[in-house]
Amino acid sequence: MARKHTDRLESGDGSHHPGPPRFVTVGEGFVNPNGDEMETRDELAPWNLDRNPDGEYTWHVADVPEGSTATPTDAPIAEFVPDVSGEYTFVLEAPDGEHELTVRAFPQQEAEGEQPRPQVRLEVTTNADQDRTQNRNQERVQFEATAQLADDAAAGDEKPDTDLTVEFYTDDWNALELDGQNSVSRAALESLERPARVYAVAVTDDGRYSIPDAVEVWVGSGAGDADDAVGIAERSDIHVERPFEPPSWVEDAIVYEIFTRRFPDQEDPTFETIADRIDHLADLGVDVLWLTPMLETDRGFGTPDSQGGPHGYHTDDYLRVDPDLGTMADFEALVDACHDHDIRVVFDLVINHTGDTHPFYEAAVDDSHPEHERYRDWYRWKNFAERDADTYFGWEGIPNLDHSNPAVRAYLLDVIDFWAPLVDGFRTDVAWGVPLGFWTEVADRLRRYDAKFFLLDETIPSDVEMGGGRFHMHHDDVLHDTLESVAAAAVAADGGGAADAGRGEEEGNGDGEERKRDDEGGNGDGEAKAKADGAHNDTDTEDAVVDTFSDMSVDAIDGASAILDAVSERARRGAHPDSEWLLYVENHDTDRFLAEHGRDAQQAAAAATFTLPGSPMLYYGQETGLTERREPMNWDGFDTAVLEYYRNLLDLRQSVPALQRAAALERVPYEAGTKYAVAYARDASAVHQIVDQTGVEDGPQRVLVVLNFSPEPTTVRVNERISGPDLLSGAQVVSESDGDESEWDWAVTVDSAVVLESEGSATE
C-alpha cells in the first residue's frame, strides 16, 4: 500500500477548538436524546478528543441575542437549545486554552418542509482581476454569493414573493474579519498561519436558511487547479479551494456494492477469492467497490437468513478483519488488486452501534467485569438497571453507542485514523444516528489528511444537512422509492403479477431455482425496509419500520414523470450545490427489483439511475439476474441477456458527455401511450462551450431519454430533433409522425429504455 496507517490524524488546527460556525433553528438546536429513531442528532463538542479524552472541558455563553436565557448543559459534550433568533458566542474552556464558537440561530418555521429551502453559492474575486496594474500590497479578496430558491427556476419570470439575503461568517480560530463589503486585504491573509475559511448562508425573509457554502483562501506560491473555478486571476498567488467539493474522481463514478460474504466463490469465500473476481467489475467499467462490513462479527458465516444472513453489521472488533475472510494482509492485497484495475475501495463504517457481543458491551453489562465502570457509559440506556440498551426499532442486537462520551469519540477517531490510509472512502451506516458535529470533525480530519478521500452517508430519509462540509454523496432514497412506486403501479395497471411481469418462463435467476421472496430476511444493520433483526420479530415493530422507511417517494399518481419530481426534490429541500447522489434500484436491504416488478420495469429503473444526474450504483447480481436479496452470486449461471443490457448501460454512461455530471437535466414536452412512460433530455453543450475543449470526450452533447415502466411496449411522441439508432440497443426506434395533423414531429417506440442523440427542440 502506498499509504500507511501509523500516523495520528488531526482535525482543524490540531487544538480542541470545536470547529466551524454552527447554524441551527430556534427550539431545536443541539440535542442528542435517546429514542427518536429518525431525528437528526447534534451536540457541541471539543475536537481532537483522541489527544485528551479525560481532560476538563466546560462551556458557557459569552454573548447572546437580547431576551435569551438559554444556556448549555454542564457536560464536556454539551447540548444547547436556542430560545431567541440571532447570534450566540460560546466559549469552550479546554486543557489547551479558551476557544470561541459562533452559533447562528434562525427562527423556527411554522410549516417546516412545505416551503423550499434556499441554496447559496459563494464566489471569490480580487481587485487584481479588474485592474492588472494593481499593486499586490493593495490587493483585496472579495466574497460574493448567489442565492436562489428551487422555485426560481420553475417559475421563470414569475419569481416567488420571497426576499433572499446572504450572511457571511469566518472560522473563529482565525483572527480574520471581513469589512462592510465582505472583502479582506491580502495583508490580512498573509498574517494568518493557516488558510482562512469563509462561509455564506442564504436566508429568506421568514428565516429559512441554506446549507452553508464555503471557500478556503490563502497566500502562497503557484496557483492550484481549483483557482480557475472560483474566479481568481491566473497572475495572482492567492489560492482558493472549495472544501465541500467531492474528490474529482467521484463526480462520474459508477459504484458497485457487494454483499461481502455472498459475492466470492461460495466454496472458498475469502478476500482472495473476491480479488479473483475483480476482473468482472473491471470488464463492466466499475469505478468504486463498496464492501459491506468485513470486520470481526457474530453475524458472519453461518448466520441464518432469519437474522439477515452473514451481513457483518454487528461489529465485535473495529481493528480486526473477520478471520474467516482472511488476514489484514489479504485485505490489503484485495485493495491493491482493485487499484490495479483503477477501482477505488469504500469501507462500510459502522460507528452508530456495536454488536451486543462486542467486548465493550459485554463489559458494560457485567458488574463483575474489571472494565465495567469504564464501558457502562459507552452505551445509551433506556434502563441500565435492567440492562435495556437504547436501540433502533427493536433491533436488540445492536446497542447504540453514546457519542456524548468523550472516550467514545476518542476511540472512534482512532478507528477512523486506522482505516483511512487503507481505503479510498467510507460509506457510513446509520449516519443519522451519529451527531452532525462529529461528522463535521470527521470530514475535516479526513480532508486535511487526504483531499481525495470520499464520504458517502446513509440517512433515511436522505438529510441535506449531511452535505456542505460533512459528506460528499447521499443515498437518493427519494428517487429509489419513487422508482419502486412507479414500477409497482405500472405492473398493477397492466393486470400482471408483479413477480412475473415481463419475464418468460425460462427467465429465472440463472441457476434454475424458482424465485422466492426473502420474507424472513433481517435488515441486519439499521437500514432494512421490512424486517426487524435477530429474534425480535414483533409484527407491529416490523410494520412501523416499513411505514417509516418506505414512504419517501414522490407521489406517483401522475405516473413516471414522478421520477423527475424526485430529482427536483434535491433542490427544493435545499441540498448543497456540490452534493452528489447515489442512484440505485436495489441494495442489500431491499428486495430485488427484477423479482418484484419484472424485467421491463427493472431495465427502465436501471436506465433512470444511469441517465439522471447522480452516480449510478449496481448491487452485486443486479446485472446477472439474481432475484433474492442476499443470495450467493451466480457465477456459473449469469442471465446473459440481463448482463448485456447492463454492459450497454455502463458503456453509454461512460462514453456520452450528455449523461455525465455536468450535463443539465431538461423536462421536454411529450405524449405517451401510457402514463408510466416519461421522456427527458440531458444536455452538456452549454457546459462544453465555456470550458477548454481539450480532453472532452467525443459523443453526443445532448440526448433524449425515454423510459417505459409498463410490461408492454409503447409509443412516445416528441418534438425533439432526434436521429440515429437507439444508443443503448442499436435498434431503429424513431419514426416521423404521419401527416400534418399531428403536433408531434417524431414517434419513439420503447420497450423499457431508449437513448437518442438530439439536436434540441424542433419548435425552437
Image: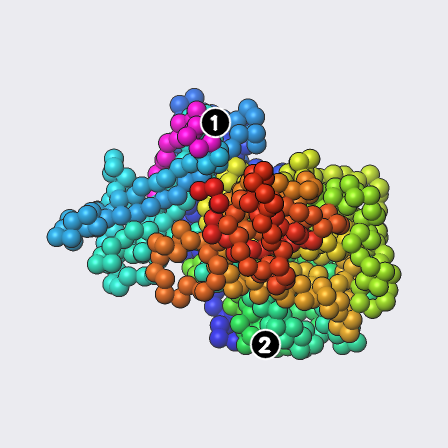
Residue at position x 42%, y 36% from top? 148
Could you tell whether 117 is left or right of 563 in the image?
A: left
Q: CA distance from mark 1 to mark 2?
A: 52 Å
Numbered badge on residue 337: 2
- Residue 529: % across, % down: 73, 47
Residue at position x 69%, y 56% from top? 603
- Residue 432: % across, % down: 61, 46
- Find out whether residue 173 is within the magenta segment: yes
Residue at position x 44%, y 33% from top? 156
For the C terminus, the quadrant is top left
Give the amino acid at mark 1.
Pro
- Between 286 and 722, the one lying in front of the other is 722
Give the amino acid at mark 2.
Ala
On screen, 505 above or below 323? above
Tell me if label 1 and label 2 are in contact, CB under 8 Å.
no
- Between 449 and 359, the one lying in front of the other is 449
- Find out whether residue 170 is within the magenta segment: yes
- Using the rendered image of the protein, determine whether residue 195 is visible from the camera's viewpoint: no
- Ranked by sequence position, the earlier of labels 1 and 2 is 1
- Using the rendered image of the protein, determine whether residue 511 is visible from the camera's viewpoint: yes
Span shown in magenta: 155-174
| Mark 1 residue element | loop
Disc 1 residue crowd, few under 14, some 14–19, many 20+, Cα 10 Å? some
- Between 444 and 271, the one lying in front of the other is 271
Q: Indicate how the structure is coloured in the image.
A: rainbow
- Residue 383: % across, % down: 74, 41
Q: Which secondary structure is most common in the magenta stretch? A: loop
Numbered badge on residue 650: none
Numbered badge on residue 107: 1
Q: How many marks?
A: 2
Residue at position x 47%, y 41% from top? 763
